Image: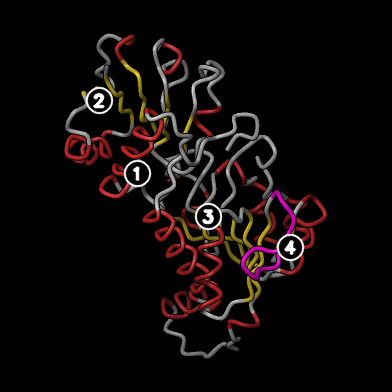
Amino acid sequence: MAILVQTTPTAMARWRPVLAEVMPEREFRFWPELGDPAAIDYALVWQPEPGLLARLERLRLIVCLGAGVDRIVADPSLPPGVPLLRLVDPYMTAAMSEYVAFQVLRLHRQDLDYMAQQRAREWRERPQRNAAECRVGILGFGTMGQDAGRKLRALGFDVAGWRNRAGAVDGFPTYSGEAGLAELLGRSDIVVCLLPLTAATAGILNAAAFARMKRGAALVNAGRGGHLVEADLLAALASGQVSAAVLDVFAEEPLPRRHPFWRHPRIVVTPHVAAETHPPTAAPIIAAAIRDFEAGRRPANLVDPARGY
Ligand code: OXD
């Protein structure tokens, strides 16, 4: 019996030694090396090509090597009945919070304006607001969203979340549903998207959402590129309805060299690095999930294919 590992070539080089150390008793097949597909009982995958998992007839468990499982559940031939786990790693949660806090602080402290002033050698103080006067709305208020929320709250920001279930979370105001989304967008100075990409959330950052935001509010998208309607963002920036955007994820990755986002003065681009999977911390979590599964215990963080996350 063997474990198939599929990820990018760069990540694969980091996974190989760590997996061998954490699960020395297992045999690994590193994609595109597959061998006999019937010998594979576990698949650790990031973005497998559609149909790959369906070829593994004895597959018992799929583990996503990232937090977002959208590429896996989008495969129409995903074998039904094979449980799928998404990776929840405190290291990645902390990394996402760092990214969110860094970008919220950058927007709050008008870094884009001061960088432009520096390029123009312009010495000018801008009005400075307190963090408590800055409302941050986090779309997607699960493990990562709440952790980022707690860290922003510790910095003094006024944080609220939008999630699928109503009810207060750890003292944060939360909103849900369409009406809740409109309310959250309308109260936020900075909107942070950490949503999973599903049929219900695709294109959620669109002209209607931007129109509901406060004039001059800013956006951070570290969810998925599919959440954002790119042309609507460009229009909202041009009109001043949205003042700035920090984007880590894109409809097409790598972001094409000719894409207008690269040179837009009010857009910060990062290359999908907000919360990278970290094999040294993730591998023991995966090994424990496989042990739990083999012992008949329900592994944590099972994906509900109907919900898509
Ligand atoms: C993830 C990601 O889903 O890095 O883990 O985007």
Ligand 1 contact, mark 2 (Cβ < 8 Å): no
> Mark 1 and mark 2: span between their CA atoms?
19 Å
Q: Which residues are magenta?
A: 164-173
| Image depth: mark 3 or mark 1 in front | 1
- What is the x, y in percent for residue 288? 34, 40
> Disc 2 marks which amino acid?
Phe
Q: Earlier in the sequence, mark 2 or mark 3?
A: 2
Q: Which mark is residue 285?
A: 1
> Mark 3 and mark 1: span between their CA atoms?
16 Å
Residue found 58% across the figure and 82% down from its top: 131
> Disc 4 marks which amino acid?
Leu
Ligand 1 contact, mark 3 (Cβ < 8 Å): no
- What is the x, y in percent for residue 41? 35, 19
> Mark 4 and mark 3: span between their CA atoms?
19 Å
Q: Earlier in the sequence, mark 3 or mark 1?
A: 3
In the displayed structure, would residue 208 be above or below residue 69?
below
The overriding secondary structure of the stretch rendered in magenta is loop
> Disc 1 marks which amino acid?
Ile
In the displayed structure, would residue 284 be above or below residue 294?
below
Q: Earlier in the sequence, mark 1 or mark 4?
A: 4
In the displayed structure, would residue 31 be above or below residue 156?
above
Residue found 79% across the figure and 62% down from its top: 183
Q: Earlier in the sequence, mark 4 or mark 2?
A: 2
Residue assigned mark 3: 143
**Marks 4,2: beta carbons within 8 A:** no
Residue assigned mark 2: 30
Residue assigned mark 4: 184
Asked if the stretch drawn in magenta spans residue 168, the answer is: yes
Ligand 1 contact, mark 1 (Cβ < 8 Å): no
> Mark 4 and mark 2: span between their CA atoms?
44 Å
